Image (spheres, grey):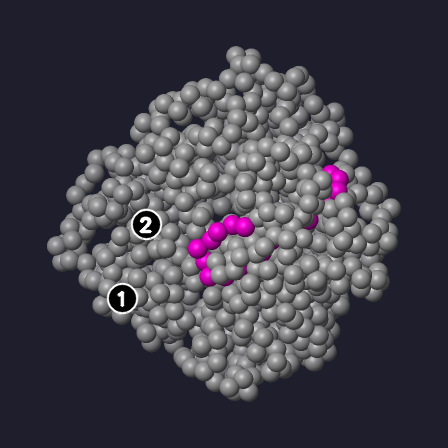
């Protein structure tokens, strides 16, 4: 017998069926029947996280998460579930937090039943074998080592060390070989067993399944697999102490980062706000503090040259606490004006305290309802995680609605929370390369110092001086309550090219699949000037950043109202993409295009934005080696992509005059391509097209520019060293397929699907090369390729290269046994490439990609299905043999190794050390 009801609050347009049940053993389950689901998504949330770790075995919960994938009583093989899912087009992952752990997977409905069997045994019957424990401790230690130079981890540790040492948040949560080897492996095994027996019990686990299956049938599957979990009441945890001691509030913390970051992070310590989910007080406060208009905090700071960016509301959160952060990216001047900036912040908080919240509640309620009713579908596994987690936090009727519900607006709730926004209840972090510090954190060696905020400053902040230019935002002009659907015109339910010329092409289509008042509008500019080398590419990057800085201030309210824009550079020019609600969107897009052409006042924020761009390029040089190798691969393969190293000095020397010249040169000669797709009438799209065409008529037009890539298949094996200031060795081996046709593309994708779990298990588990290992399908301008990568703290780059090559040669020889999985592999790729579009945004993106690839028949899905149907396993074997033997396949090896030099001849390769010469002389594939 199960208990529970089906009365869950949903919105009027939701055609899915929900059913909440509690099984006899106490397991709480939410099943969702979604007729449009392409695959089943399953998530389990367990009320256990690193807060449960014993003080003498920190990282135990993280290790437990790893160990669940190392075999169980029914499926003892390591990564058996991962391998099963991979063969059937699915995937699995997990994450450990402070108080909860999440396990989730996706699989086609056909394989849901055996997958649930795997999942139940994975969660409830792990083996905890000693040899596996040893290996996973090594993997966790490699993960820890990999993040040693991660500034987020380093700041996080300072946060922990300056919190209450009696609170479990203060503990080191990741674990490493030092903390996990304090006890013998046998003792660690026993600790894992005890923790699992206490926490991984039915009343401590929630489950969500989203699928096309009838809810009753889905519940029966769940009961078959999870009913046997023992009904044990989990132990009641001791109440958590205060997160911060009194002396840890009202303090300033100076922190030195590795990267050239300058930040002011103001944290207010709040109690848990989960109980206020029907009022959303922090959402209101966040949006007011984050207003990027000229009269908001960021606008005020930017006008004075103090800050360039703001984010508000994030912060650690638990069952009894919530940190509320105001995070500002500073300029050099801002670092000298911290006290004044704090005074402005408290003045703005004072404005919120003394202003009626009625209009803000009304706008937020309308926006939440619109987002809920008309949201584009999200990734199903993400939704399943959210719903499984919500079961722990909200009453049954509001499990689905909790995120969007605002039916109890109440000024007094905001006022109550604003009392915590006090200088004596805040922590001020100042992150700066030149910070004055007096200590170093234990694990990540982060220099920092902390001291009480002076009584004089506290007094100032309690009575901040008024700033006349700081004003709360006016009514949102982009908010629309009209979200009616247009009548479809038969000729436009399939995409049509409505304008076709040498220098301007536009496609228009009406969405008849998702029934949402939304749409996407893409406009891409190919600019002949953009092809003239690294200098113009760098200045273009700065120009686009200056425009985005300007738009950030003008259009923050548009983003709040559900109108989004993305202005970005690409190798042949730049693109503008607007998305969201269709009402007002085309006018919004036109306004943006007009300002791209007309905005010339770069003086105001020029130095700030230039410094930000220079810093971003410079920080790229500090990325972990694997990231840098992939960035270098991109620059080598694409003619108009350049390395951060080649751009950083140009950026530093660029002047306003050069930006003006570049802007006019880029816009002067161009080709425009556009897609308008969604909830619009033909006359609306035509009006948009005519305005864009009229704007284009004032400039010189040209044909669409070629996106050429380097042809490796006509080269010897190439070896490219990249110096990195990092102790780990790293390797990327890239194999370029012979042709850019559909057949080679599908063979490369099939190979990646086959090899990915095998290589991961080999590199991580068997050879223990390192924590950061893997393979991936890596196309460049639609030319297919596959990459294998490893970053290792213990092996040389040459050893890694030889090991990867040996693996591939053995795979080629021993490929035949995988033939039994051939049809499943093909079905997985068909699901991935030929399945229904998950949401309107993905459909628009697919159509836009087809236009970019000059696939004007938009038959890619059908063509893919037909080609896949014709491919047989011997075709893959021939392809893999060519890769292993280097026949008709291009091979480019990139590596970084501080300690060892590789002689190219030792690997049968030739040295590639001159990027400019390589790009100049290498044949291209169009």
Horizontal side, residue 856 vs residue 617: left or right: right
Of the 4 image quadrants, the one containing the N terminus is bottom right
SS of the residue at dot 1?
strand
**At 32% across and 27% down in the image, what residue appears?**
603
Question: How far is disc 2 from disc 1 in space, using C-alphas?
Answer: 19 Å
Horizontal side, residue 617 vs residue 193: left or right: left
Up the image or down, 573 lies above or below 723; here it is above
SS of the residue at dot 2?
strand
**At 32% across and 34% down in the image, what residue appears?**
607
**At 54% across and 78% down in the image, what residue appears?**
199
307 or 768: nearer the viewer? 768
Quadrant assignment, res 715: top right
570 or 721: nearer the viewer? 721
Quadrant assignment, res 483: top right
**At 60% across and 49% down in the image, what residue appears?**
719
The spot of residue 770 in percent (x, y) is: 56, 65
The nearer-to-camera label among 2 and 1 is 1
Q: Is residue 381 visible?
A: no
Please give the residue where the numbered disc 2 appears in the rendered image.
263
The disc, 2 or 1, on the residue closer to the chain's N-terminal end is: 2
Most extreme residue toward the top is: 698
For the magenta stretch, what is the residue range? 721-740
Residue 545 located within the stretch drawn in magenta = no
Q: Is residue 330 visible?
A: yes
| Residue 439 tag number | 1
The spot of residue 909 in percent (x, y) is: 65, 50
Of the 4 image quadrants, the one containing the C terminus is top right
Residue 726 located within the stretch drawn in magenta = yes
179 or 856: nearer the viewer? 179
Q: Are marks 2 and 1 in contact (CB under 8 Å)?
A: no
223 or 397: nearer the viewer? 223
């Amino acid at each position: 017998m199960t208990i529970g009801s089906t009365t869950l609050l949903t919105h009027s347009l939701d055609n899915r069926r929900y059913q909440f049940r509690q099984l006899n053993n106490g397991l709480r389950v939410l099943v969702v029947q979604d007729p449009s689901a392409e695959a089943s998504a399953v998530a389990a949330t367990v009320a256990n996280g690193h807060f449960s770790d014993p003080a003498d075995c920190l990282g135990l919960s993280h290790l437990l998460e790893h160990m669940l994938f190392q075999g169980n009583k029914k499926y003892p093989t390591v990564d058996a579930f991962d391998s099963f899912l991979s063969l059937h087009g699915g995937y699995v992952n997990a994450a450990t937090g402070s108080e909860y752990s999440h396990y989730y997977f996706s699989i086609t409905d056909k394989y849901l039943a055996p997958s649930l069997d795997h999942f139940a045994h994975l969660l409830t019957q792990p083996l905890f074998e000693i040899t596996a424990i040893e290996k996973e401790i090594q993997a966790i230690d490699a993960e820890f080592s990999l993040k040693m130079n991660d500034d987020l981890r380093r700041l996080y540790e300072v946060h922990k060390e300056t919190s209450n040492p009696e609170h479990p948040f203060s503990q080191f949560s990741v674990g490493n070989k030092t903390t996990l080897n304090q006890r013998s492996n046998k003792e660690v095994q026993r600790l894992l067993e005890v923790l699992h027996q206490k926490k991984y019990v039915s009343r401590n686990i929630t489950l969500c399944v989203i699928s096309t299956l009838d809810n009753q049938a889905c519940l029966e599957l769940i009961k078959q697999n999870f009913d046997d979990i023992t009904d044990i009441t989990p132990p009641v945890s001791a109440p958590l102490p205060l997160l911060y001691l009194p002396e840890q509030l009202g303090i300033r913390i100076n922190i030195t980062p590795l990267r050239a970051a300058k930040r002011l992070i103001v944290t207010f310590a709040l109690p848990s706000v989960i109980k206020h989910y029907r009022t959303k007080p922090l959402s209101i406060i966040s949006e007011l503090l984050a207003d990027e208009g000229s009269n908001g905090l960021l606008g005020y700071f930017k006008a004075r040259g103090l800050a360039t960016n703001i984010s508000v509301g994030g912060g650690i959160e638990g069952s009894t606490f919530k940190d509320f952060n105001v995070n500002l990216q500073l300029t050099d001047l801002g670092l000298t004006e911290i006290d004044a900036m704090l005074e402005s912040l408290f003045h703005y908080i004072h404005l919120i305290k003394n202003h009626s919240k009625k209009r803000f509640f009304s706008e937020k309620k309308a926006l939440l309802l619109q987002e809920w009713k008309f949201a584009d579908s999200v990734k199903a596994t993400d939704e399943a995680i959210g719903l499984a987690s919500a079961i722990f936090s909200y009453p049954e009727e509001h499990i689905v609605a909790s995120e969007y519900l605002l039916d109890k607006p109440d000024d007094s709730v905001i006022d109550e929370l604003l009392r915590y926004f006090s200088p004596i209840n805040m922590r001020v972090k100042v992150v700066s390369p030149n910070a004055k510090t007096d200590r170093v954190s234990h694990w990540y060696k982060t220099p920092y110092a902390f001291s009480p905020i002076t009584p004089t400053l506290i007094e100032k902040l309690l009575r901040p001086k008024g700033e006349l230019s700081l004003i709360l935002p006016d009514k949102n002009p982009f908010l629309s309550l009209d979200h009616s659907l247009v009548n479809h015109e038969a000729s436009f339910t399939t995409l049509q090219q409505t304008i076709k010329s040498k220098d301007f092409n536009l496609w228009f289509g009406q969405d008849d699949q998702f029934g949402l008042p939304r749409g996407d509008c893409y406009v891409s500019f190919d600019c002949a000037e953009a092809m003239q080398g690294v200098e113009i590419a760098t200045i273009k990057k700065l120009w686009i950043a200056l425009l985005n800085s300007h738009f950030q201030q003008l259009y923050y309210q548009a983003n709040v109202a559900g109108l989004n824009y993305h202005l970005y550079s690409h190798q042949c020019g730049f693109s503008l993409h607007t998305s969201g609600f269709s009402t007002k969107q085309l006018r919004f897009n036109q306004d943006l295009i007009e300002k791209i052409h007309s905005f010339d006042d770069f003086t105001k924020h020029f130095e700030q934005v230039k410094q930000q761009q220079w810093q971003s390029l410079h920080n790229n040089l500090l990325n972990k080696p694997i990231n840098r190798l992939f960035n270098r691969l991109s620059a080598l393969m694409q003619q108009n992509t350049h390395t951060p190293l080649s751009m950083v000095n140009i950026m530093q020397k660029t002047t306003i005059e050069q930006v003006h010249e570049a802007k006019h040169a880029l816009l002067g000669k161009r080709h425009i391509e556009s897609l308008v797709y969604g909830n619009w009438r033909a006359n609306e799209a035509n009006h948009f097209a005519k305005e864009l065409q009229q704007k284009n008529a004032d400039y010189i037009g040209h044909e669409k520019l070629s996106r050429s890539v380097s042809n490796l298949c006509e080269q010897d094996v190439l070896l490219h060293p990249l110096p990195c200031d990092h102790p780990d060795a790293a390797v990327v081996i890239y194999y370029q397929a012979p042709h850019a046709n559909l057949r080679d593309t599908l063979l490369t994708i099939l190979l990646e699907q086959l090899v990915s779990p095998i290589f991961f298990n080999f590199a991580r588990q068997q050879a223990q090369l390192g924590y950061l290992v893997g393979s991936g399908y890596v196309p460049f301008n639609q030319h297919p390729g596959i990459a294998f990568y490893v970053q290792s703290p213990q092996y040389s780059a040459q050893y890694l290269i030889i090991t990867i090559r040996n693996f591939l040669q053995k795979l080629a020889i021993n490929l035949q046994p995988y033939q039994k999985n051939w049809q499943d592999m093909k079905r997985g790729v068909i699901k991935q490439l030929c399945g229904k579009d998950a949401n309107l945004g993905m459909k628009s993106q697919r159509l836009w990609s087809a236009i970019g690839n000059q696939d004007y028949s938009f038959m890619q899905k059908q063509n893919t299905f037909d080609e896949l149907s014709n491919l047989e396993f011997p075709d893959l074997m021939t392809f893999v043999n060519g890769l292993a033997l280097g026949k008709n396949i291009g091979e480019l090896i990139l590596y970084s190794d501080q300690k060892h030099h590789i002689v190219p001849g030792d690997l049968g390769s030739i040295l590639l050390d001159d990027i400019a010469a390589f790009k100049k002389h290498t044949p291209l594939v169009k």
